[in-house]
Amino acid sequence: MISVIALLSLLLPLAGSITPDSQGLRKRPIILNKSGGFVAGGNIISSPVFPNFTLSCDHGYMEYFIPWRPRKTSIVMWHSATTQAFQNRWDGGEGYKDMFLRRRYPVYLWDGPRIGRANWACESYTYTPSYRDQGNFAAWNFGPSYPNFWPGVQFPTEDREAWQQATSSRYVEFDTNKNIHLESQAAAVAADSGRLGDSIVYLTNSASGLRAQMTAVKSNTTNVKAIVAYEGYGYVFPDTANITAGEPFGPIIVPLEDFKKLAKLEAIQFVWGDHRAESFPFLQQARQAVKLINQYGGNAEIFFLTNDGGLKGNTHSAFADMNNNEVAGLLDEFLEKNGLNGYDTETSDNPSDLDQGWLEEISH
């Protein structure tokens, strides 16, 4: 009790000095109610030699962090290559995970089947080194070619360790249509389970954007509310659109009635960084997808961080860029605009009320 009283005496004056509109709102302590993880989806297969021996496989893994007095909307951060991209900025600074925990959103980090912490597959595969470090540089839009950075790029260009951390933290990716269906099916099971709540926003990057779209298509509930896709590679189209399916990044063609599920979401935002020409194939696909989603009554948009957000130098993964705090501010605006920033109970966003309330509660 003495330690709690001491903590109160130190933190209550600080909490009372912060106003809801100040930068302090984004730097308040992270207070968790609980954290943990669980698996979702998957199959159980029997050994062809010993039928009584089984393997649980092809499930996804969800790690979660639930703040004290959380907002109603859960943010599922779905990477294309590594959860690390959401955990830290390129230079090791604060990443999206902690930023949005401070804002009191429940945060979930998803590893799809056969990826990262969900890597037990139901079938064999062969890993062959693909020597992708230099290819990552251009694919992530750090510059036109390795090691030539774009002028003003939001990456710590003089920090060799930052580059090494970025390119080393990748998982093996399975960029096939089969894997798109495998990952999205497990994610739909997680979404429909209720364990993520009934207001889910997927934050995606690169190829995970296509997988999140397919998850919304496959979901049998209305729990998925929005998708924010940072530089999405691949899109879903209806079978009436006269578009040819492709691989490994789509397009994926689905029946029209399934496609209309995307139009029923509260909002979809396809976000693009700097140095993306209109001729870029995935940007062209994004424009086609937006047009069709909105044609069926949806609320989809293209958002350029440069032209629409006033930012400069953003890469393929803007949420990890050096200006990710400003990028997060634009996401704040999106969530508020679409009514996805509220609390599940009558709770003010004033840190004086929230943090002081928590301190008072634990003192009893």
Image (cartoon, rainbow, N blue to C red):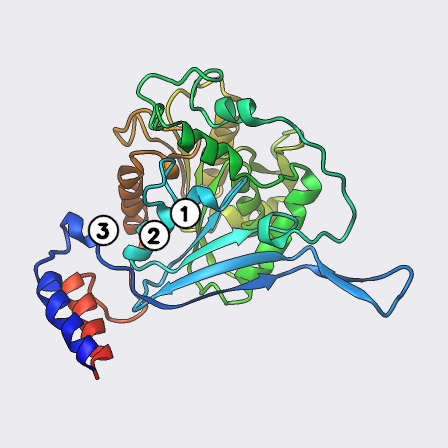
Q: Visible in this render: residue 291?
A: no
Q: Disc 1, disc 2: CB below 8 Å? A: yes
Q: Give me the C-alpha separation between circle 2 and circle 3.
A: 10 Å
Q: Residue at x 76, y 62 (%)?
A: 55
Q: Visible in this render: residue 112?
A: yes
Q: Between 154 and 247, which is closer to the camera in this rendering?
A: 154
Comparing labels 3 and 1, the label whose residue is closer to the camera: 1
Task: Say whether residue 102 is left or right of residue 279.
Answer: left
- Pointer 3 residue: 26
Task: Residue 350: give x, y in percent of width and height.
Answer: 16, 61
Circle on res. 87:
1
Where disc 1 sits, the SS reads helix
Q: Amino acid at mark 2?
A: Asp
Q: Mark 2 vs mark 3: which is more N-terminal?
A: 3
Q: Amino acid at mark 3?
A: Arg
Task: Residue 131: give x, y in percent of width and height.
Answer: 62, 26
